[in-house]
Amino acid sequence: MNPLDGGTLLLLLGWGTLVAMDLVSVPQAMYARPLVAGTVAGLICGDLMIGLQLGVLLELFALDVLPVGAARYPDHGPATVAAVAASAGAPWPERMGTAVLLAMLLAVLGGWSLQRLRHLNAQALHGRAAALAAGSEPGIRALQWGGLGRDALRGLLLTALGLAGALLLRAFPPLPLRLQAVLGAAAIGCALAAVAGGAVRSAGRGARLHWLIAGLAAGLLIALGLG
Amino acid sequence: MNTPGRSRAFVRLFAIQGDWNYERMLGIGMGWAAAPLLDDLRTGDPARHTAAVVRSAEFFNCNPNLAGLALGALARAEQDGVPGEQVSRLRTALCGPLGAIGDRLFWAGVVPALSALAIAAVALGAGAWAVGLFLVAYNALRIGTGWWSLGTGLREGLQVGGAVGRSWLPRAADRVGPVAGFAVGLAVPLAGRWLLGGLAPTEMVLAVLLTLGGVVLSRWGGTHYSAVRYALVVLVLLAAGGMVMR
């Protein structure tokens, strides 16, 4: 496996923090999507292919999420960065199952941290209620930058925890090959279940369902044609 | 409306959810983004400016990519001297429609469509280029929409609701759903084939069974089911079982 030196870990920490902020706070440019977060993390680790593979796999989970309004959803971005760090340099699917397990735990923790952040932002709002009632622009500015700062800290801590988990996984000897393959297949099955279940739910019974079936048929034909 | 103010407000729209909270939701972000658009009032009508700043940070929620429509319309209404209660009513009235159209267009349409196409392209061998193209396409679309939204809001003011109804937005929101459905359908078998490549037939069967099981649970498992929870349970059980059997 490729060693993760201090510079690589620092870059991953910075990238994970940016990724965490992109989910909601700024700039929502979609680099928080696992597909992007994983690919860049793979580049940083010197293993683009594992970044792409884990990026695609975890993106299938992310496609099940509809991040609307006050909905509660997992934070897959920093989780993807940690998963790539955990398995970079290992042959596919070695360590993939355990990396996905780490990513799922972090995604849940990330979702919880997002709820905490929103409560903390509300508390800060109470602290500046008088300034807001008086139409204070500095008060609004302080709240805005405070919210961004708290989210940056959330992303930093979440990524640091994820990278610690990744280093721990890398320190352990790999699981038996057979078990790794089973875990890898299970992770892929769960990811496909996530995207397929979400697609069926959101398709309803209208035109979208018909197009979903048409797409599925086209994908199956291409996949079978490729052998 | 002065151009520097519009440009600064547009840039601030990218961080409109920077202080998202359960009480005012996008409210503080809206107030922060509105500041450059309300600058003219500061010298012309200071009392109005103060009242406008208070209103600008009140509760607001909609899809962030369409927030510019509300931001522009509310700033225009403040500049035009529309009574405060009417400005607040407009603010409240815009939440629902801009949230519904924006969520359908972006979160349920553009994002899954582009993401699924990128997945399919990666699975077919396009590599990281597909990921780059996904980023470029999405951001071109959302930046264009954001600039158009702010401009339309500033131009239409109180009439922004009618302008949205006559615009391309409702049609685009209707049409992108089927595209997303097709793209996701296309991506699932291709991603499955690509990810499962190299695994033995028995493991492939396990993956297919878990896929079918997850789909069934997501359909009939009620609120207790979530994809992440399902994956956690399956992976932990298999890992624990494997370790015990060693």
Image: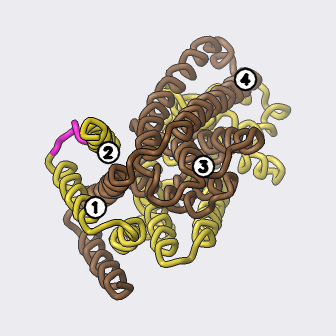
Chain colours: A brown, B yellow
Q: CA distance from mark 4 to mark 1?
A: 54 Å
Look at mark 2 in the image and give the residue it sits on. Answer: B231
Residue A23 seen by the camera: no
- Start and end of the magenta stretch? B221-226
Q: Is residue A200 above or below residue B22?
A: below
Look at the image and tell me in which quarter the C terminus of chain A lies: bottom left
- Residue B131 appears in which quarter of the rendering? bottom right
Cα distance in 3D space between marks 1 and 3? 37 Å
- Comparing B82 with B202, the one in front is B202
Q: Nearer the viewer, residue B94 or A4?
A: A4
Residue beneath disc 1: B203
Q: CA distance from mark 3 to mark 2?
A: 27 Å
- Distance, label 4 to label 2, CA atoms, is 40 Å
Residue marked by disc 4: A142
Whether the magenta-drawn stretch holds residue B195 is answered as no
Residue A148 lies left or right of residue A215; in this view the side is right
* A210 in relation to B20, above or below: below
Q: Nearer the viewer, residue A27 or B220?
A: B220
Taking B22 as reference, is A36 left or right? right
Residue A55 badge: none
- The tag on residue A28 is 3
Spatial CA distance of label 4 from label 3 is 21 Å
Q: Who comes first in sequence, dot 2 or dot 1?
A: 1
Q: Are marks 4 and 3 on the same chain?
A: yes
The three-letter code of the residue at mark 4 reads: Ala
Q: Please name the residue shown 65% across and 32% down the image.
A: A156
Indicate the amino acid at tag 1.
Glu
